[in-house]
Image (cartoon, rainbow, N blue to C red):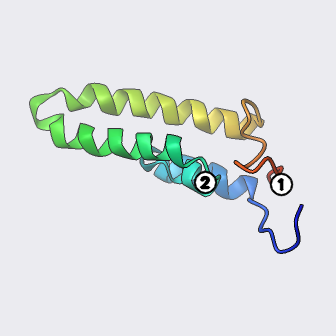
């Protein structure tokens, strides 16, 4: 690990996924800005269209996606044992 690099914490990623996951906070924290941006955009667009009932589908999709992300972080699977730079999460 390069000097001065702040290692990402596993517990912080897990808590961000649990409480702010639909906004992509855990993915922003881990440096996965593409995924995070899609989660944030889907959440915002879904809330804007919830009045015509279409938004509930989007919210359900994001909710399932975040639940899976939470489980992946919890188990350290699917690349969620490392940040976007390839450094392991501190446990």
Q: Quadrant of residue 47?
A: top left
- The residue that disc 1 covers is 91
Q: Nearer the viewer, residue 45 or 10?
A: 45
Q: CA distance from mark 2 to mark 1?
A: 13 Å
Q: Residue at x 82, y 51 (%)?
A: 87
Q: Residues within 10 Å of mark 1 (few under 14, many from 20)?
A: few
- The residue that disc 2 covers is 15
- Asked if residue 64 lies left or right of residue 56, the reply is right
**SS for callout 1:** loop
Is disc 2 in contact with disc 1, using a CB cutoff of under 8 Å? no
Q: Position of residue 43 (x, y in %)?
A: 33, 42
**SS for callout 2:** helix
- Asked if residue 56 lies left or right of residue 3, the reply is left
Q: Residues within 10 Å of mark 2 (few under 14, many from 20)?
A: some
Is 46 above or below relative to 91?
above
Q: Position of residue 49 (x, y in %)?
A: 16, 36
Q: Residue at x 74, y 59 (%)?
A: 8
- Tell me the quarter of the image containing the C terminus: bottom right
Q: Residue at x 49, y 30 (%)?
A: 65
Q: Position of residue 66 (x, y in %)?
A: 51, 36
Q: Residue furthest bottom?
A: 4
Q: Position of residue 78 (x, y in %)?
A: 72, 30
Q: Nearer the viewer, residue 60 or 38?
A: 38
């Amino acid at each position: 690990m390069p000097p001065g690099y702040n290692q990402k914490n596993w517990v912080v990623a897990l808590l961000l996924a649990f409480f702010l996951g639909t906004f992509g906070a855990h993915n922003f924290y881990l440096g996965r800005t593409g995924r995070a941006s899609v989660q944030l955009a889907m959440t915002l667009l879904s809330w804007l269209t919830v009045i015509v009932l279409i938004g509930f589908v989007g919210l359900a999709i994001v909710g399932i996606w975040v639940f899976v992300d939470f489980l992946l972080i919890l188990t350290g699977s699917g690349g969620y044992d490392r940040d976007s730079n390839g450094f392991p999460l501190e446990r």
